[in-house]
């Protein structure tokens, strides 16, 4: 079992920045990959970014590439999502998730555990 708790969401103006955090407990944190997903009203949950078990490999969705950075601190059992140059279309509930493998992956069904989500709202 893995428990995940996100924090750091909020309201920001377009062009601004936010940093999301996700604290994990339960299974050995350094043994599995982590991902961030988002879901806007009326839309399906979509992949944002993923990082492998060690932090040495990352993957990003095209809309956020170059603006968002995923990282992890295995000593603190925490994964982060630094979001810069935010746009109104980034508005969504953001979820962190723990994968069922050590490798960064984009598929929703490859993640077994999910946080409760944190709202990010970007005003124009």
Image (cartoon, rainbow, N blue to C red):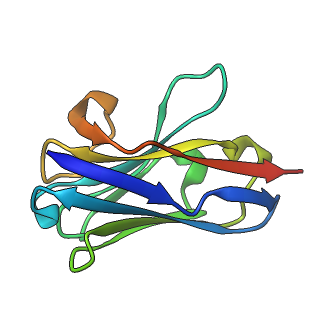
Residue at horizontal 43%, vertical 66%?
A: 80
- Does residue 82 appear left or right of residue 102 in this picture? right
Residue at horizontal 51%, vertical 60%?
A: 7
Q: In the image, is residue 40 above or below residue 117?
A: above
Q: Which residue is at the far right?
A: 124
Residue 58's image quarter? bottom left
Q: Position of residue 78 (x, y in %)?
A: 32, 68
Residue at horizontal 89%, vertical 50%?
A: 124
Count of number-bearing discs: 0
- Does residue 74 appear left or right of residue 86 in this picture? left
Q: Position of residue 76 (x, y in %)?
A: 27, 77
Looking at this view, is 30 or 67 the one in front? Answer: 30
Residue at horizontal 12%, vertical 46%?
A: 101
Q: Position of residue 67 (x, y in %)?
A: 61, 63
Q: Position of residue 92 (x, y in %)?
A: 64, 40
Q: Which residue is at the far top?
A: 42
Residue 89's image quarter? top right
Q: In the image, is residue 47 above or below residue 2?
A: above
Whether residue 67 is visible to the viewer of this picture, yes or no, is yes
Q: Quadrant of the N terminus?
A: top left
Whether residue 52 is visible to the viewer of this picture, yes or no, is no
Looking at this view, is 65 or 6 the one in front? Answer: 6
Q: Which residue is at the far bottom?
A: 75
């Amino acid at each position: 079992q893995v428990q995940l708790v996100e924090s750091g969401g909020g309201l920001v103006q377009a062009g601004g920045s936010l940093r999301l955090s996700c604290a994990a407990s339960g299974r050995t944190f350094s043994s599995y990959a982590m991902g961030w997903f988002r879901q806007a009203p009326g839309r399906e949950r979509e992949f944002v970014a993923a990082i492998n078990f060690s932090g040495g490999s990352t993957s990003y969705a095209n809309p956020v590439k170059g603006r968002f950075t995923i990282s992890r601190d295995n000593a603190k059992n925490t994964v982060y999502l630094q979001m810069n140059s935010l746009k109104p279309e980034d508005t969504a509930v953001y979820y962190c998730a723990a994968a069922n493998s050590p490798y960064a992956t984009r598929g929703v069904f490859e993640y077994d555990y999910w946080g409760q989500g944190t709202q990010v709202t970007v005003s124009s």
